[in-house]
Image (spheres, grey):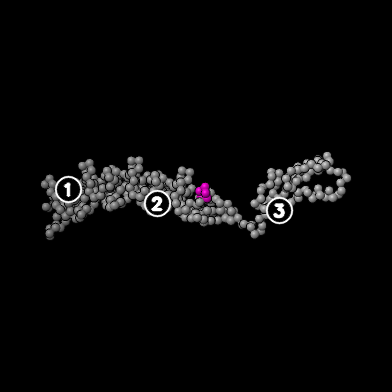
Amino acid sequence: MKRIIFKRQISALLTVAVLMSSGIAVFANEETGINEDIPVDSEAPEAAEEENYESEAPLFEDADEDEAKPEQEEEYFEIADEDETEVLSTGFEYSNGNTYYYVDGRKQTGWIKYGNDYLYADSNGVLAEDCWKKIDGKWYHFWSYYMETGYEKVDGYYYYFDNSGAMRTGWIKYGENSYYYAESNGKLVNGWKKIDGKWYYFSYHSMVSDGDFLIDGAYYYFNRKGAMQTGWIKDGSRYYYADSTGKLATGWKKLGGKWYYFSDDGNMQTGTVDVDNYLYYLSDSGAMRTGWIKLNAYGDYYYAGSDGKLYQNKWLKENGQWYYFDQYGYMETYSVTLKGKTYYFNDDGSCKNP
């Protein structure tokens, strides 16, 4: 490519004009490069003026690129040949194992918006690719060249990245009332985790809350904030009891000197229950009853032995009186036929003809 050089010679021309007005012509000696002052004869032939004209430097000249740069007073402009014109590009460029991103021919650094995604290039323009990157004190992860957000699996572990792409730690709320918990290294907790002195359980990284939950064959109860509960637990009209490990009581449990019965999912039972083909009666508080049990104002009664089992198809003699209880545990108040004999009873259940 050639440079077209425009030389300023204003000061030189002014000097020549002044000297010529004084009757002195200035010529440059081509061999020595030293200017010589030569008097000018006002009657010199026109040839002399012609020679003086030819000795002046031309206003334009060609200069190769490898020539010395012009003095400060000189200005030049570069004009590219048509075959050397380059189209400025936008996109990815791969070089020496690294990837770069250009916009209008300029290599990008820092955060780069790419459609709905974001890329990141270091100060040399090298794009982060399939790696962790700490930027301004926060950790980010890039899948291929793209910044990740949300719930993502990285090298076998799950992490949560907020909308800005920063890795989160500690409690993380998502949705209306769901939570994750991330360790200081960003890994999401799965399973049991003690936080600030309280136990929590995370199923598929999501905190379990507000109810009972089966874990490794045992039920546990978690409040609305996700903390595991112990002792007596009230949930609406239902009651549970959890020991010091958090496991909910199931089956028979003696508490405070009284027996209680809990279903397989830990729900305390009340009223009449069938356990191993025996009937028991549990009060509204859940405690097992023994002795006479009045069921209602209509004169319905049960009777439970010291072990809590209701009398069924069985006679009871008390204070010299005989009473009979049917297969459902109810005391007879009318009549019953047993082995061909009919027995009659008073309203208070006592037998008239024992």
What residue is rendered at 50% in x and 52% in y? 127
Q: In this view of the protein, which residue sits in the foreground, 145 or 17?
A: 17
**Which badge, 3 or 1, is on the more N-terminal residue?**
3
For residue 62, the mark is 3
Whole-angstrom CA distance, mark 3 to mark 1, is 121 Å
Q: Position of residue 198 (x, y in %)?
A: 33, 42
Q: In this view of the protein, which residue sits in the foreground, 207 or 188?
A: 188
Quadrant containing the N terminus in the rendered view: bottom right
For residue 145, the mark is none
- Report the magenta residues as a range: 121-125
Look at label 2 and name its amino acid: Tyr
The mark lying in front, picked from 2 and 1, is 2
Q: Main secondary structure of the magenta part?
A: loop
What residue is rendered at 16% in x and 55% in y? 313
Q: In this view of the protein, which residue sits in the foreground, 182 or 89?
A: 89
**Which badge, 3 or 2, is on the more N-terminal residue?**
3
What residue is rendered at 64% in x and 59% in y? 83
Instruction: Name the residue tied to disc 1.
Output: 307
What residue is rendered at 87% in x and 48% in y? 45
Whether pointer 2 and pointer 1 mark residues with C-beta atoms closer than 8 Å, the reply is no
Look at label 1 and name its amino acid: Asp
